[in-house]
Image (spheres, rainbow, N blue to C red):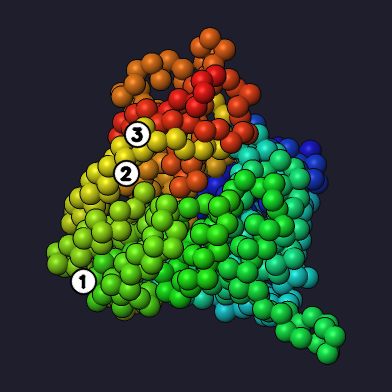
């Protein structure tokens, strides 16, 4: 059987897609390798959100062209958003690419691959910008994508006891800068029963933290006709209902998260469910994008800076220990210094735990590229980006320092291999993936981020002893471990390797920059 090398770019949606694809292909007998040279099939699961992500894939494809000249049987596939966005043009431009598969067609990947292997001819499965694969909410239950989501395999240790479940596919928002509605199609909420079944399977397999995924996850709503005593009735499940049901039906699941929330129409019902159900993580990733109402309007975001900050205030009142994460775009067309200052002020007021900051990247097919010239010079975008990063890092340091002396419970992920460095690739479950946290393309991420994926050098600089224990080197039976708090902060502490997969109370002893160090409460 063939060896497959699969590399993933982009957000958690792509990480999840790769997990599903590898589960599906492994079940058919394919093996996965992290050594591209040992692979007979190379697949790139791509992201189109910013140009840089696409350039990375193009440069990898360029290198493979040379290899394929000497190894014609090598199969090269591009799956995900870039395949959908570029379409068959890519097959014409890059004739050494054998296979294209859009994110909405991934259930067809095994057949495409098989066809390439048998016929040696290029194959593709793409939704096309206007076609809608699934027209009604109910039809989704029967389509192959649903089966793909339900047929996953889960390995607790490799997955660090965490798993994603997609609850909303696609997006209807059409923010003017964004390709996602074009590449991932219309918004469809999966049935609550399918989500519950998937969650139950994951929990039974040892999963300790489930993250519900959607581009606008709080807009989840599912309607179905059920038979009731007085005849057929319509059952409506909102996001708050779904959260509540998952929390109730999975009492042994210590943590339930969700990503990414959209700031408009964020109901108090969701916040109330969070407040009343402690196993729902105190964490809201809720991108503002800009602090300027004029720019927000041009972006078609549907809220103002004031209403956004009011929402954060409301959330803090209802869920007092909540932490926020944000995304911001700098250098959107026509952004003046004054506009940028409002974004800076918004970031200061929001006091995010982390904020992923992006320079505006004009994307083909979007309204922004058609309507507005990309008129903010690159150097100015970079300057604003770096400045905002500094603001955010300062906030992150302050928030981390406030934790010193406090006891927090972390989900221990295992020895701190420091394998992800933000920009570096890491190997997860036999396939290579670019470490991802935000619902944003990573690898190019320039987030003022509280994530310790940036850790090895930082930790070594701030605490040299930590570096010695890197890669889980044993120190009196103890290794350096990492765990995450409910607010998604990464904490480093020493303990026995068997702590992996346990909820561990730790007392924070120091916060150096973005890294939090702690001792296990009661000692080990
Ligand atoms: N659905 C989420 C939301 O609306 O908050 C975000 C999803 S989007 C894939 C991830 C992030 O990428 C966005 O929040 C935005 O900050 C950034 N992004 C999207 N398109 C971009 C573009 N053309 N240029 C720069 N950043 C972009
Ligand atoms: Fe949808 Fe988010 Fe893109 Fe807006 S930024 S179109 S909400 S995915």
Question: Horizontal and vertical percent for residue 140?
Answer: 72, 72
Q: Depth check: 148 or 219 in front?
A: 219
Which mark is on residue 334? 1
Circle 2 is placed at which residue position?
399
- At 51% from the left edge and 49% from the top edge, which residue is drawn? 9
Question: Horizontal and vertical percent for residue 214?
Answer: 55, 63
| Distance Cα–Cα, label 2 vs label 1 | 33 Å
Q: Quadrant of the N terminus?
A: top right
Above or below, 230 against 86 in this view is below
Secondary structure type for disc 1: loop
Label 2 environment density (alpha carbons within 10 Å; few <14, some 14–19, many ≥20): some
Circle 3 is placed at which residue position?
404
Residue extending farthest to the top is 476
Which mark is on residue 419? none
Residue 521 visible within the image: yes
- At 58% from the left edge and 20% from the top edge, which residue is drawn? 496
| Distance Cα–Cα, label 3 vs label 1 | 42 Å
Of circles 2 and 1, the one toward us is 2
Of circles 3 and 1, the one toward us is 3
């Amino acid at each position: 059987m063939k060896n497959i090398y699969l590399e993933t770019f982009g957000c958690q949606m792509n990480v999840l897609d790769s997990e599903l694809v590898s589960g599906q292909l492994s079940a058919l007998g394919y093996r996965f390798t992290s050594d591209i040279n040992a692979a007979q099939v190379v697949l790139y699961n791509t992201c189109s959100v910013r140009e840089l992500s696409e350039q990375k894939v193009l440069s990898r494809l360029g290198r493979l062209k040379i290899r394929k000249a000497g190894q014609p049987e090598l199969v090269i596939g591009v799956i995900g958003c870039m395949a959908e966005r570029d379409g068959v043009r890519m097959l014409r431009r890059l004739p050494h690419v054998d296979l294209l598969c859009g994110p909405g067609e991934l259930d067809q990947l095994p057949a495409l691959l098989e066809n390439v292997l048998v016929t040696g001819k290029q194959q593709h499965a793409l939704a096309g910008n206007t076609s809608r694969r699934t027209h009604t909410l109910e039809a989704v239950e029967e389509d192959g994508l649903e089966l793909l989501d339900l047929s996953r395999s889960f390995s607790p240790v490799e997955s660090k006891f965490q798993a994603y479940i997609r609850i909303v596919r696609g997006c209807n928002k059409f923010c003017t800068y964004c390709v996602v509605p074009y590449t991932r199609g219309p918004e469809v909420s999966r049935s609550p029963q399918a989500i519950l079944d998937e969650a139950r399977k994951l929990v039974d397999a040892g999963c300790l933290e489930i993250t519900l995924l959607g581009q606008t996850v709080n807009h989840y709503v599912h309607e179905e006709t059920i038979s009731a005593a007085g005849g057929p009735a319509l059952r409506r499940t909102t996001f708050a209902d779904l959260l509540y049901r998952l929390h109730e039906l999975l009492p042994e699941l210590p943590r339930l998260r969700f990503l990414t929330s959209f700031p408009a129409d964020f109901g108090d019902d969701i916040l109330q469910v969070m407040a009343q159900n402690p196993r729902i993580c105190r964490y809201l990733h809720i991108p503002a994008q800009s602090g300027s109402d004029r720019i927000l309007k041009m972006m078609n975001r549907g809220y103002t800076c004031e209403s956004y900050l009011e929402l954060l205030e409301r959330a803090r009142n209802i869920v007092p220990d909540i932490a926020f994460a944000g995304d911001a775009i700098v250098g959107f067309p026509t952004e003046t210094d004054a506009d940028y200052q409002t974004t800076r002020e918004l970031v200061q007021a929001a006091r995010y735990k982390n904020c992923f900051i992006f320079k505006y990247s004009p994307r083909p097919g979007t309204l922004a590229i058609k309507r507005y010239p990309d008129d903010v010079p690159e150097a100015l975008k970079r300057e604003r980006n770096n400045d905002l990063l500094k603001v955010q890092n300062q906030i992150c340091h302050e928030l981390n320092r406030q934790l010193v002396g406090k006891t927090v419970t972390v989900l221990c992920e295992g020895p701190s291999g420091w394998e992800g460095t933000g920009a570096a690739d890491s190997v997860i479950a036999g396939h290579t993936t670019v470490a991802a946290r935000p619902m944003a393309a990573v690898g190019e991420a320039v987030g003022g981020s509280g994530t310790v994926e940036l850790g090895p050098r930082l930790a070594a600089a701030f605490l040299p002893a930590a570096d010695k224990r890197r890669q889980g080197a044993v120190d009196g039976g103890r290794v350096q471990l990492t765990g995450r708090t409910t607010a998604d902060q990464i904490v480093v502490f020493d303990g026995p390797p068997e702590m992996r997969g346990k909820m561990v109370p730790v007392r924070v002893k120091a916060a150096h920059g973005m890294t939090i160090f702690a001792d296990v409460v009661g000692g080990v």
